[in-house]
Image (tube, rainbow, N blue to C red):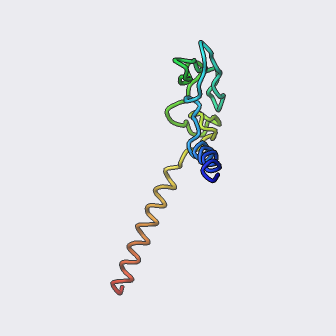
Amino acid sequence: MRTILCIPVLVLLLAAAFPLSANAQFCEGNETRPCPEIGICKGAVRHCMNGVWGDCEGGVQPEPVEICNNGLDDDCNGLVDECVNSVWIVLIILGLLLFGVMGFLIKMGY
């Protein structure tokens, strides 16, 4: 009796751990499906090919990188202007270097 109960539980656990992606869902015939419209991405469709949904084609596709400070989600990931300011990166690196030098000087007795 235990084996019979364990198999459905195992199937449910595997299904939760490895969900099908949008491309892996099965389809039939010459179906088309609109792609999600996120950010600037609009008007693209997926076509059914050999029983599996293809990639999004046509319409406005994502930019390869986010264009900073334009108020748009250019890379269609759901976040607007998620750009990193290079000034902060430089300040953080300089702070870490200063912290390391000061630690070294204290350790040397200066």
Please state which of residues 15 and 81 is positioned toward the viewer in this rendering.
15
Q: Is residue 75 above or below residue 101?
A: above
Residue at the top extreme of this rendering = 30
Q: Is residue 55 above or below residue 30?
A: below
Please state which of residues 40 and 100 is positioned toward the viewer in this rendering.
40
Residue at the bottom extreme of this rendering = 109
Residue 57 image offset from top left, x and y in percent? 55, 20
- Residue at 61% x, 27% y is 41
| Screen quadrant of the C terminus | bottom left
Residue 71 image offset from top left, x and y in percent? 65, 37
The quadrant in which residue 23 appears is top right
- Residue at 59% x, 22% y is 60
Residue 49 image offset from top left, x and y in percent? 53, 17
Residue at the left extreme of this rendering = 108
Residue at the front extreme of this rendering = 1
- Residue at 59% x, 21% y is 46
Q: Is residue 77 left or right of residue 110?
A: right
Total numbered labels placed on residues in the image: 0
Please state which of residues 13 and 108 is positioned toward the viewer in this rendering.
13
Residue 22 image offset from top left, x and y in percent? 59, 31
- Residue at 33% x, 84% y is 108
The quadrant in which residue 75 appears is top right
The quadrant in which residue 30 appears is top right
